[in-house]
Image (cartoon, rainbow, N blue to C red):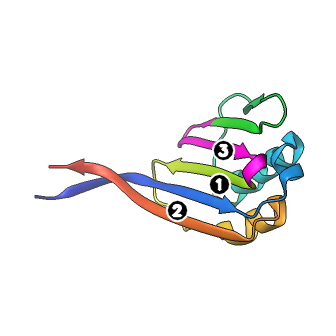
Amino acid sequence: MSKLTTGQEWLVDASGCAPGSLKDAAALAALFEELIVVLDLKVVGQPQWHVFPEPGGITGLALLAESHLGIHTFPEHGFAALNVYCCRERPRPDFEALLARHLGTTACVVRELKRGVTA
């Protein structure tokens, strides 16, 4: 049995984030922009942002030619859940540094999944 790789997905749990950054659409957009550049991604249309009423956070989604980039923030917990799926393999970005810089993250857990079809 063999597996055809159809890309990779990163699930990133970011803790200890600055609550203000998790409610700041511009800070989240800057994080998306840096990830798009670092990973050489192609955005289809414009990223979409939904801002929840206080004390809620923000949900963001960018449709990519390569798949998608999404984030859900929880300022009341200092937590963000980031998801990046690319249909072709790319080098792993330094999520820890990116999230520390953009969101003030102090702890980061990154899980990488190889996506594919078993034949």
The residue nearer to you, when weighing 100 against 107, is: 107
At a point 78% along the width and 48% down the height, the residue shown is 75
The answer to whether one can see residue 32 in this image is: no
Foreground residue among 56 and 102? 56
For the residues labelled 2 and 3, the Cα–Cα distance comes to 19 Å
Q: Is residue 30 above or below residue 51?
A: below
Q: Which residues are magenta?
A: 63-77
Residue 61, given in percent of the width and then of the height, sits at 66, 36
Q: Is 72 inside the magenta-drawn segment?
A: yes
Badge 2 vs badge 1, beta-carbon distance below 8 Å: yes
Q: Secondary structure at mark 3?
A: strand
Disc 3 and disc 1: Cα gap in Å?
18 Å
At a point 77% along the width and 47% down the height, the residue shown is 76
Residue that label 2 marks:
90
Q: Amino acid at mark 3?
A: Ile
Name the amino acid type tagged 1: Asp
Q: Amino acid at mark 2?
A: Arg
- 7 or 83: which is nearer to us? 83
For label 3, the residue is 71
Q: Residues within 10 Å of mark 2 (few under 14, many from 20)?
A: few
Q: Is residue 51 above or below residue 97?
A: above
> From what the image shows, is residue 8 above or below residue 96?
above
Q: Is residue 66 magenta?
A: yes
Residue 63, label in figure: none
| Residue 93 location (% of width, % of height) | 63, 67
Whichever of callouts 2 and 3 sits on the residue coming sooner in the sequence is: 3
Which residue is labeled 1 in the image? 40
**Label 1: which secondary element:** loop
